[in-house]
Structures are given as structure tokens and as C-alpha cells.
Image: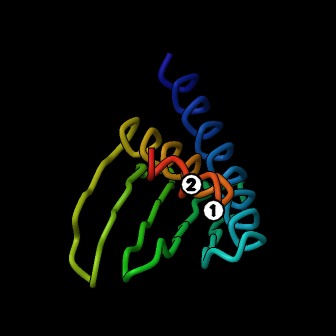
Amino acid sequence: MFPRLAEQYRSVVHDLVMSLQALAKSLQNSNVAATCYICGDGRDGQGASFVANLGDNHMVRFLVSDFGISWVESRNGHELVKLEGAEAIQELQRVAQVLQIPPVRNRQRAEA
């Protein structure tokens, strides 16, 4: 049972790494400062560090590796929120959806 669970977790990490790369590229194409650094070769583990600038010195960092998953949100260099595991993935999804809404629609939602 444990080897199967370990392999499933490695698969989740791999999927997250691929998704983070795609998200960073998409945000860069939308003129949002975002980077995704990959480490590992996939055989002995893999991981990624995703960082996006949300403006006004507001940054998010999502780290994924064989050791864990975490989300850190900061403003002006001060940590605001730190989440781990499933909560970190859910927050990444929420922010990704908000960031990928075209700016005009984003303003209209804020005004509603």
C-alpha cells in the first residue's frame, strides 16, 4: 500500500510542476511578472518554485516537491498567509482564476 501511495504523490507533484510551468507562461503572456523554476530530473524526485507578483509589492510563492506543498503570500516582504497541502493547492487555483480574468472583466467584477 505505501509504495502505491508514494507513487501517487510523485504523480501529483509531477502534475503540479507541469501546471505551474504552464501558469507562469500564461501569466507572462498577460504581462504579469511570474516565474517557475524546476529542480530535479523526475527520476529521483522533482519540484518547482512558482512566484508571481500581484502588484503593490504583493507576492505569492508556491513550492512543490517530494517533501511537501506550500503557499506563501506576502506584502512588502512580510508574510501574510502560509498554507500547506490541499489548502495550498486550492489557494493556487483561486488566484490563478483571478489572474487569468481579462483586466476589464476583473474591474467590472470589483465594481459589482
- Give me the C-alpha separation between circle 2 and circle 1: 5 Å
Amino acid type at mark 2? Asn
Q: How crowded is mark 2: few (under 14 residues within 10 Å), some or many (20 or more)?
A: few
Quadrant of the drawing holding the C terminus: top left
> What residue is rendered at 38% in x and 41% in y?
85
Figure check: 81 above or below 60: above
Q: Mark 2 points at which residue?
A: 106
Figure check: 72 above or below 68: below
Figure check: 63 above or below 58: above
| Left or right: residue 32 compared with residue 29 | left
- Evaluate if marks 2 and 1 touch, with contact meaning CB atoms under 8 Å apart: yes
Where in the figure is residue 4, as x and y percent of width and height?
Answer: 58, 22
* Front-most of residues 82 and 97: 97
Say which element carries label 1.
Answer: helix
Q: How crowded is mark 1: few (under 14 residues within 10 Å), some or many (20 or more)?
A: few
Q: Residue 103 carries which label?
A: 1
Amino acid type at mark 1? Pro
Say which element carries label 2.
Answer: helix
Residue 31, quarter of the rendered image: bottom right
> What residue is rendered at 21% in x and 77% in y?
78
> What residue is rendered at 54% in x and 35% in y?
9
> What residue is rendered at 67% in x and 46% in y?
14
Q: Which residue lies furthest to the top in this view?
A: 1
Where in the figure is residue 11, as x and y percent of width and height?
Answer: 65, 37
